[in-house]
Amino acid sequence: MPVTSIGLDHAASSERVSTGIPRLDNMLGMKGYYRGSSILVTGTAGTGKSSMAAHFVDAACRRGERCLYFAFEESRNQIVRNMHSIGIDLAQWVNKGLLEFRNSRPTFYGLEMHLVSMHKAIESFNPAIVVVDPISNLIAAANELEVKSMLSRLIDFLKMKGITALCTTLTSGGAVLDHTQVGISSLMDTWILLQAIEGSGERNRSLYVLKSRGMEHSNQIREFTLGSNGAELIDVYVGPGGVLTGAARVAQQAREQFESLEHSQEVERKRRDIDRKKVVVEAQIEALRSAFEAEKDDLEQSITKLKHSQEVHIKETQGMALVRKADDLSQVPEKHAKTKKRGDK
């Protein structure tokens, strides 16, 4: 199986498959990986690479797809037991014939025999998903160049058959994070980095997508936690001291909740002040309205009295003029003057 057998004329599917972790699907264009693509998960020891692979396998088996798991580090029973701690039951898929493990030490065969046995297993089982965990262990059987050649031919074979491949690789603590030990990152369509962040006296995991060809993907760091309900991605907090995870994130959340509570209480105090001032102002307005109405009544009574006095004065003046038989008609109201003129005629 020479290197020259590698071709670049394989089909490219637009179908998407779930990663098994909902928020990771969201980070990958809201849909997950492309079917038939190659995925690389790198990280230091204990960051959760195998757990991510288990989530991917579990999601595929739930869709009724067959999965083939090549493990070079742990036995099948150990993997099944360990995944129970994060709420994943892989044994049920083994019993249903949807999941098959092929476990062996890298030094048990030479690289070519490993490649041949993997080809035969894939042809026999006909899986939709293949997991290789971890590819970095193959270096124990050969040098880096030979391992890269072998993996290149394997990835090409899987792409030609439209099989989605997920490979994990271990990076050492002092290594550059965006450099893989085997050096096959350029062959992969999606590259996810798991990283340990130390701070506040504890060690926490983080995840981010280094690349994912052909799709819009998030460039944000997420805290990666593992619990009895499986893997979960949590938004990290970026403070003055950098990214906050674990206890530091919880403490920051508590501070923000306290500040939010204080803010809400201050807003409520302001609203109560407004309501009190409104009551006082409305009371003052009502008092002024009452005083105005009272003064208005007094003024209207005074106006009525003045009008009445004026009418009485006019009547008295008219009466005196008639009694005196005044010749000055200007002193007599108009209707009385007309009456006197008719009498003269």
Image (cartoon, grey):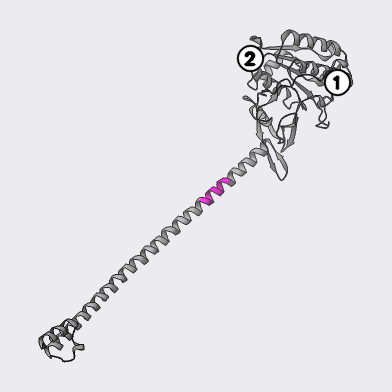
Left or right: 11 in relation to 277: right
Quadrant of the image containing the N terminus: top right
Residue 17 location (% of width, % of height): 67, 22
Magenta-highlighted residues:
260-267
Q: Nearer the viewer, residue 211 or 23?
A: 211
N-terminal of the pair, mark 2 or mark 1, is 2
Residue 264, magenta (yes or no): yes
181 vs 339: above or below: above
Residue underneath mark 2: 64
Residue underneath mark 1: 148
223 vs 101: above or below: below
Query: Dot 2 lies on which element?
Result: loop
Quadrant of the image containing the C terminus: bottom left
Residue 40 location (% of width, % of height): 76, 24
Q: Residue at x 83, y 17 (%)?
A: 153
220 vs 83: above or below: below
Q: Nearer the viewer, residue 102 or 165?
A: 165
Q: Amino acid at mark 2?
A: Gly
Report the number of discs: 2
Is the stretch drawn in magenta largely helix, strand or loop? Answer: helix
Q: Amino acid at mark 1?
A: Lys
Query: Dot 1 lies on which element?
Result: helix
Residue 92 location (% of width, % of height): 63, 13
Residue 268 location (% of width, % of height): 50, 50
User: Mark 2: few, some, or many residues within 10 Å (few <14, many ≥20)?
Assistant: few
Left or right: 299 in relation to 263: left
Residue 187, magenta (yes or no): no
Q: Which mark is residue 224?
A: none
User: Mark 1: few, some, or many residues within 10 Å (few <14, many ≥20)?
Assistant: many
Where residue 206 sits, quadrant-wise, is: top right
Where residue 287 sits, quadrant-wise, is: bottom left
